[in-house]
Image (cartoon, rainbow, N blue to C red):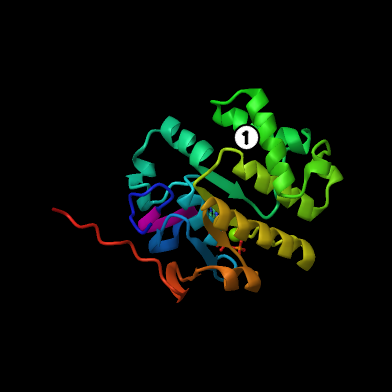
Amino acid sequence: MNNPGAPGALEAKNIHKAYFHSGSDLQILKGINLFLPAGSFTALVGPSGAGKSTLLHILGGLDRPTEGQVLVGGRNIYGMDDAALCALRANRIGFIFQFYYLLPEFTVLENVMLAAHIAGGRSSFETEKEAKELLRSVGMEKRASHFPSQLSGGEQQRAAVARALINRPEFLLCDEPTGNLDSVSGAEVTDLLKRINREKGTTLVLVTHNQELARVAEAVYSLRDGLLHATKAVHAPQTVAHR
Ligand SMILES: Nc1ncnc2c1ncn2[C@@H]1O[C@H](COP(=O)(O)OP(=O)(O)OP(=O)(O)O)[C@@H](O)[C@H]1O
Ligand SMILES: [Mg+2]
């Protein structure tokens, strides 16, 4: 499981990120090294503006680092062409954001199905069946025909979780998934994410200010001054024996 080349394993090597703003470079990430074994559950914490979202986006192929590599299943995703990177994002990585980002003009069921259509490869019949099963598993089967504006925050987030899972991703990257929820809805989403990690073996990374989420994670890293500091356990890649 700790093999960096395994499906579901992710490794970041020497990640730097600078934003060019008002005539100067703003150094946000200054050499991040991180290993996520397949099926692991990791929390990223740190003060506002530290670069947590920036790092999560880089890990998920949404934003290029200024320097460094992200290896998914042993392959550097930023060495891929745009089409390959797009396909990897659609098929292997699920994202969950604080503000859900469901498409307002589509129903819950359509939002979930659309993600599968974008990735391609399955019939509408299959996709609808799977989307309905997922909505049932997140307790949203009775809200499938609702539009996002007709849902509570917790319901929108559970719909977003179903959408993130429709392509059976190896990774689920979550940016403050409970940040906008009250404590009861937040606890439901927390339980849901834990269950997905345990039952499906999805590698889970979440940025959170939620103490409970950080408590249940296997490893917690704090991002400060552009660097990661392990505050609970550390995932280390297994040394691969070469013959
Ligand atoms: N496109 C950009 N151009 C310039 N600076 C940016 C850009 N995007 C982010 N930043 C800066 O990078 C820093 C890190 O931003 P980021 O969103 O990653 O922080 P964060 O740790 O997620 O904070 P929060 O907890 O508030 O969500 C911030 O200081 C922000 O102003
Ligand atoms: Mg953020």
| Of 157 and 27, the residue lying toward us | 157
**Vertical comparison of 136 with 190: above or below:** above
Secondary structure that dominates the magenta span: strand
**Vertical comparison of 108 with 35: above or below:** above
* Residue 167 visible: yes
Crowd class of label 1 (few under 14; some 14 to 19; many from 20; radius 10 Å): many
**Vertical comparison of 154 with 159: above or below:** below
Is 17 within the magenta? yes
Q: Residue at x 65, y 35 (%)?
A: 130
Identify the residue under disc 1: 115
Q: Residue furthest bottom?
A: 231
| Of 226 and 242, the residue lying toward us | 242
Instruction: Read off the magenta span.
Output: 10-22
**Label 1 SS:** helix
Residue 128: image location, x then y, percent: 69, 30
Residue 77 sits in quarter: top left
Could you tell whether 132 is left or right of 70 in the image? Answer: right
Where, quadrant-wise, is the N terminus in this rendering? bottom left
Residue 243: image location, x then y, percent: 13, 53
**Label 1 lies in ligand 2 vicinity (Cβ under 8 Å):** no
Image quadrant of ligand 1 equals bottom right
Q: Residue furthest front?
A: 199
